[in-house]
Structure formats: structure tokens, C-alpha cells
Image (spheres, coloured by chain):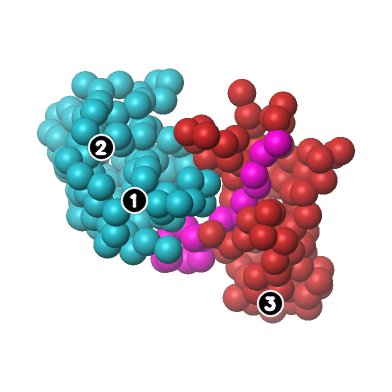
Amino acid sequence: AQRVTQPEKLLSVFKGAPVELKCNYSYSGSPELFWYVQYSRQRLQLLLRHISRESIKGFTADLNKGETSFHLKKPFAQEEDSAMYYCALYAGGNEKLTFGTGTRLTIIP
Amino acid sequence: SAVISQKPSRDICQRGTSLTIQCQVDSQVTMMFWYRQQPGQSLTLIATANQGSEATYESGFVIDKFPISRPNLTFSTLTVSNMSPEDSSIYLCSVTASGSTDTQYFGPGTRLTVL
């Protein structure tokens, strides 16, 4: 069965500093990986997906199959980045989306 | 993306009662799911709501406790039955849009408190 691990429950970063939220997964096939974000008092929303290879709000994430990782990065943190971030894996077909436990990112002004 | 609404947005219920949560989507969707997010926890999938057939439940969740209906491609309900304080949680509906079976969109959630 697939599994998603986010080792950091809490992460605090100063404004302007680089951000990296870690995500590791275990799955024997070729997964699709996602990052979801939940800002305060807002619904959970898709931030980015690895197959799009896009940058959203300055965030990027590269799928590293060798290390089975999908870390989320941003070179310069902004205060509005403070939120809960969830890494998720989709195994294809009618498989469910498997979420990590989430990382609460706090940007210190 | 799909626009998803949930009713009620929050409720406070007495132990032993039941609450039905509604999920409405503004377009026909392929898949609908129900999640639970307990305080400080990640999202846990309760079940997949299948249109025209019984829902598919995840391990640890049963139909008697969480009956689900999906009468059409835009609407589903989740009932939390015989509630106890341990059922206090946020319940989320999510959907995958037709033609995109991997990306899920989430409703605003229903915050349930059981006394």
C-alpha cells in the first residue's frame, strides 16, 4: 500500500528565507504527487501537481524517484505563505488519494 | 475546477443523535469522496460515494455508522449516526472532475462538535 510521510509537523521560517517542506513516499508503481494547501479559514486547495511541472505562488516541487521524494520549495518566503501544507499521492485508476500528515508552515515577519 | 458547497457548515450535536451532511457540486463529477479531519490530524478517507450503488468504505469505517447516499452525479450525503464525542471532527466532501480522475477539489467542510 502507498504511504506519504511529511516528517515535519511544524516549520517556522523567517520572511525572505528559503522554504523547503519535505515529503517522502512509498509506492511500487509510478505515482502522481500533489501538494495541497489550507490557509487559515479557507478550504483545502490544490497548490501544484508534479506532472504539470509548474511554479505556483513561487513554489516548485520536483519528483525524485530515486529518493522517493517530492519536496516543496520556495526561494524567498512571504508572510502569506503561512498555512498548512499536505503532500498527497495518487496511485492511478480508482485508487484513493493518500495524504501525508501535513506541515504547518509559519513565516516569521 | 468544480464549485462545491456543504451544508451545514457547522453543528453542535448531542451524543446519540445523527447528523446528515450534504454535498452539492455545480457540475457533474466522476467521483465523490468523504473525508474526516480530526483536530490536529491529517485527512482520512471515509468512503467513496458511488452513484447508483453502495458506497465503498475504507478500513475502519462501516455503513451503519456512516451511511452515504449519492442519488446523482452532483449530490451526496454523509450521515454520522449515533454520535459520540469522538466523532467531533471536520467532515469534507471532495470530487474529481470529469476527465481528470486524479486531481481532487474539496468542499469547505462541516465542523461537527458532539457534546
Q: Mark 3 and 1 residues: CB-CB less than 8 Å, in contact? A: no
- Residue extending farthest to the front is B99
What's the residue at 64%, 31% (across, down)?
Answer: A3
Q: Is residue A104 above or below residue B86?
A: below
Residue A64 location in percent, x, y? 82, 46
Q: Amino acid at mark 1?
A: Val
Q: Do badges 3 and 2 share one subunit?
A: no
Q: Mark 1 and 2 residues: CB-CB less than 8 Å, in contact? A: no
Q: What's the colour of chain B in the image?
A: cyan
Separation of marks 3 and 2 at Cα, in angstroms: 43 Å
Numbered badge on residue B51: 2
Separation of marks 1 and 2 at Cα, in angstroms: 10 Å
Quadrant of the image occupied by residue A62: bottom right
Q: Which residues are magenta?
A: A30-45
* Crowding near the residue tagged with mark 2, few <14, some 14–19, many ≥20 C-alpha atoms within 10 Å: some
Residue B92 location in percent, x, y? 36, 48
Q: Residue A86: in sight, yes or no?
A: yes
What's the residue at 61%, 23% (across, down)?
Answer: A1
Q: Amino acid at mark 3?
A: Gln
* Crowding near the residue tagged with mark 1, few <14, some 14–19, many ≥20 C-alpha atoms within 10 Å: some
- Give the red chain's letter: A
Q: Which residue is mark 3?
A: A78
Q: Nearer the viewer, mark 3 or mark 2?
A: 2
Describe the element under mark 1 as helix, strand or loop: strand
Q: Is residue B11 magenta?
A: no
Decide which of B25, A86 is in the foreground and name it: B25
